[in-house]
Image: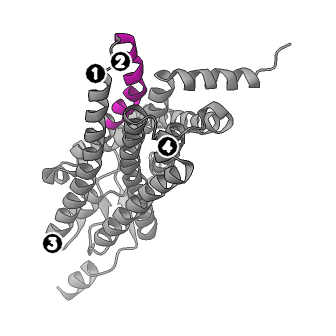
Amino acid sequence: MKLEQSRNDTELTEFILLGFWVSPKARVPLFLMFLLIYLIIVLGNISMLIVIKIDSRLHTPMYFFLQNLSYLDLCYSTVIAPKTLATFFSKEKKISYNECATQFFFFALFVGTEGFLLAVMAYDRFSAICSPFLYTIRMSQPACIRLVAGSYVCGCINSMIQTGFTFSLRFCGENRLDHFFCDVPALIKISCVDTFVNEIVLFILSALIIISTTTVILISYGYILSTVLKIPSTHGRSKTFSTCSSHITVVSLFYGTVFFMYAQPGSISSPEKSKIVAVFYTLIIPMLNPLIYSLRNTEVKTALRKTLLRKIPWH
């Protein structure tokens, strides 16, 4: 009895990522699909960063925020994807305790920051459409830098709180995480102490971030819609609102999946559902964002074409 208690009280030094329950035949196709998605993420977001950097016409507040969005998408998918790909054919699928905590910290940092940045982007569109004469003052370069820095600070505070609470839990004998990365629901599930406080903290933090940022977004778009409806011509209304369509699509995808994953108390009890949703917001959304902004934005498409033509040698 004493030996068993001693073994259970031993501090864990590593976790095992169980990942996806698939047959050996499906492992290679799944690995190739994940690899392709990650390559598209890297290519798409780096392309956005380069195009916005080198095209002087895109040196505006809107594209400054978009550049930061691409950077965040690239960062938080990179925190997850390489380790996930490495565990596909690994027999042990181990991740050290410190590596797990580090992965979780940076993932929570970048995802939380993206939530606040999307609210900042909505405020930017509100300022451009509803107060065009004050836009250059409201969205001066120092103001834009402060807004982005504020997003990172808020994301960092959220990440520190969540990491502190999650990794203050005790993990006794069980070290198998039924997930493909270190996420709160999977870690809470294997803890050997009461996790009620942690679940409440997760729910409250997620709810606070979602409510505060979506309030800014909804109010901004409420004013935008009111302003757009006052434009007499149909073409004018369509052209004005088209500048917001990409952002609305990205916001809907991001907040829909984050709410489904973290802002529902019952979400922790379904690991398979959690893994499917997690794939969507860790890989699919970062892959879709540059495509959404490039395919639905004339200025970005023009800049991309000019950049590509500049690189192609003509004889």
Please tell me in which quadrant of the rendered image residue 39 appears: top right
Asked whether disc 2 touches disc 1, contact meaning CB atoms under 8 Å apart, the reply is: yes
- Could you tell me how far apart the alpha carbons at marks 4 and 1 are, in whole angstroms? 26 Å
| Residue displayed at 19% across by 53% down | 268
Q: Sequence order check: which comes first, mark 2 or mark 4?
A: 4
User: Where does residue 124 sit, x and y in percent of width and height?
Assistant: 42, 40
- Could you tell me how far apart the alpha carbons at marks 2 and 1 are, in whole angstroms? 7 Å
> For mark 3, what is the residue?
194
Label at residue 229: 1
Q: Which residues are magenta?
A: 234-251
Q: Sequence order check: which comes first, mark 2 or mark 3?
A: 3
**Of residues 117 and 261, which is closer to you in this image?**
117
Callout in the foreground (1, 3): 1
The answer to whether residue 93 is above or below residue 68 is below
> For mark 4, what is the residue?
65
User: Where does residue 108 sit, x and y in percent of width and height?
Assistant: 38, 57
> For mark 2, what is the residue?
237
User: Where does residue 245 sit, x and y in percent of width and height?
Assistant: 37, 26
